[in-house]
Amino acid sequence: MSQIKNPLELYKHLNKSNCRKCLLPSCMAFAVAVIQGQKTLTDCPDMDTETVKELSAGIVSRNSRQTDTESILKEFRKEITQIDLAEAARRLDAPFQDGMIAINCLGKDFKIDATGEMTSECHRNPWVEVPVLHYILRSKGKQPTGEWVTFGSLKGAAEWNQFFTHRCELEMGKLADAHNDLFFEILHIFGAQEIDKVTNSDQSLVIYPLPRLPLLINYWEPEDAFESKLSILFDKTAEENINTESIYLLGRGLVEMFRKLIVQHTRDGKLF
């Protein structure tokens, strides 16, 4: 058995049905979890004992999340080479020029060519690259309906819900608490728009990290015995335009971006 050093090498041996019987949203997510030591091959009910034994003998390393993300990016870029970008642009109602499709993310265009390579006037990072490529490959191009739902109610969100709550909503809420004026100023710079209150929150702002993926950020200020709270809602069509893992990555990306901007624009350069 040849060595299996990254999720993609393991993914090739899975049935790719995305059945979620392992309690993860996809076979790719399962491959990542196995390589990182969070799951074992026996957690896949469709894999026979002999195959589990053979593959387990070949797994020789535990890679970092950065390495795993790079592997996923490599696979997505390969898939991009196999599709018609012009057709994808029509499906997504996105600009297509000089052989490149342009996907707008928070007011900035990210241009992707036929090899899957991405260019932009702003900083690129995997938090953005993976969701953008996934959006091009999988989005059905559904128009938002204005029906807002929680992340946990989206298809396939069960495994990611706890991560999203703690690493996206709670972390973003901490930034809003510590740098309230600057936090909301940054949101407005990136095109956030106030909407009629969907909840009883003090602030309700919609931003578009992807053209057909609006996020509704609700913030409650601390009052008397009540602590502050920040929640993020999604249009019901989100589950048809992108998967929950990519939504989680976008949320983490927003938090990291806000952190960097706050550090740059505070006098002491500190978050808290």
Image: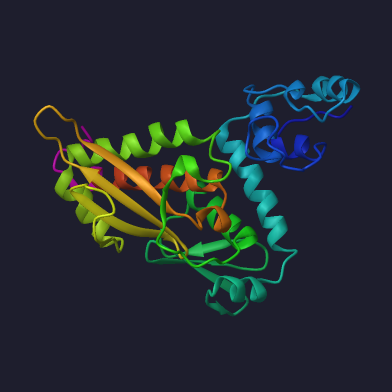
Q: Main secondary structure of the magenta part?
A: loop
**Residue 89 point in image, percent of width and height:** 59, 73
Residue furthest out toward the bottom: 97
Left or right of 145, for residue 134? right
Residue occupying image coordinates x 83% and y 36% = 13
Residue occupying image coordinates x 75% and y 28%: 44
Of residues 199 and 31, the one drawn nearer to the viewer in this rendering: 199
Magenta segment: 263-272
- Whether residue 10 is in magenta: the answer is no
Asked where in the image residue 52 lies, by quadrant, the reply is top right
Picture quadrant where residue 176 is located: top left
Q: In the displayed image of the protein, which residue is found farthest to the left?
A: 224
In percent of width and height, residue 180 lies at 17, 44
- In the displayed structure, 23 sits above or below 193; it is above
Q: Nearer the viewer, residue 25 or 168?
A: 25
Q: Quadrant of the N terminus?
A: top right
Q: Is residue 131 left or right of residue 195?
A: right
